[in-house]
Amino acid sequence: MDELQKKIDEFQKHVPMTDVTLLILKSHLIIEARLLEFIKERVCDKIYKEISEQREWTYHIRIFLAHALSDRDEIPSANSHIIWPALRMLGKLRNQIAHDLEHKEHSLENKMREFIKIVDYEGKRIGAKVTKENLLRVFWYATILLHSYLTIDRVPSRFCDENL
């Protein structure tokens, strides 16, 4: 769990909770780094180098690739039903922030709420009702939860693992 704590500390250092634009952009960047680590554990170094150097249309393709690779894991992730839809929604949020000079507040808030609902679909993990006043904080918690899932599942589990 030391590795997870290091990654959480890194996330907290780089992702501010005070500005919606920075929150979405920075959380997207750091979660994409976890996504790349996830892929790196499942492909050879030569292919990983090519994947990591690509800059166009990469985020959504990386999600599809990681998802396909994780489906080949001996022991599937317990959080697959959360990880892949949440990553896609985070990409949509990031694109809305990055490509629209002025975003429609309700549209952005609705997407943020949808992201939170995907990550915390039972409403039990974050433990807070989402209001306009706490939306940034709850969204931040949801992004760190997604970040943690990717960190935990970074290395594929195998039946021969001693920790099982």
Image: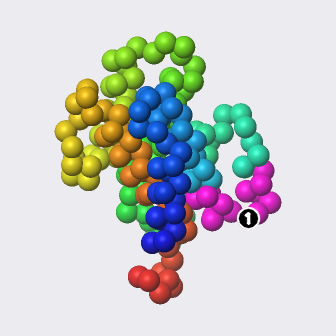
Q: Which residues are magenta?
A: 37-50
At x 57%, y 19%, the residue is 99
Q: Is residue 8 magenta?
A: no
Q: Quadrant of residue 132?
A: top left
Q: Position of residue 123 (x, y in %)?
A: 22, 47
At x 76%, y 63%, the residue is 45
Q: Position of residue 143 (x, y in %)?
A: 42, 45
Residue 55 in view here: yes
79 relative to 120 in the view: left or right: right
Q: Position of residue 75 (x, y in %)?
A: 45, 71
Q: Is residue 47 magenta?
A: yes
Q: Dot 1 corresponds to which residue? A: 44
Report crowding for label 1: few under 14, some 14 to 19, many 20 or more residues within 10 A (C-alpha).
few
At x 38%, y 42%, the residue is 140
23 and 91: which is toward the camera: 23
Does the magenta stretch mainly form a helix, a strand or a loop? helix
42 and 35: which is toward the camera: 35
Rendered view: 74 above or below 151? below
Q: Position of residue 50 (x, y in %)?
A: 78, 50
Q: Quadrant of residue 117?
A: top left
SS class, disc 1: loop
121 and 23: which is toward the camera: 23
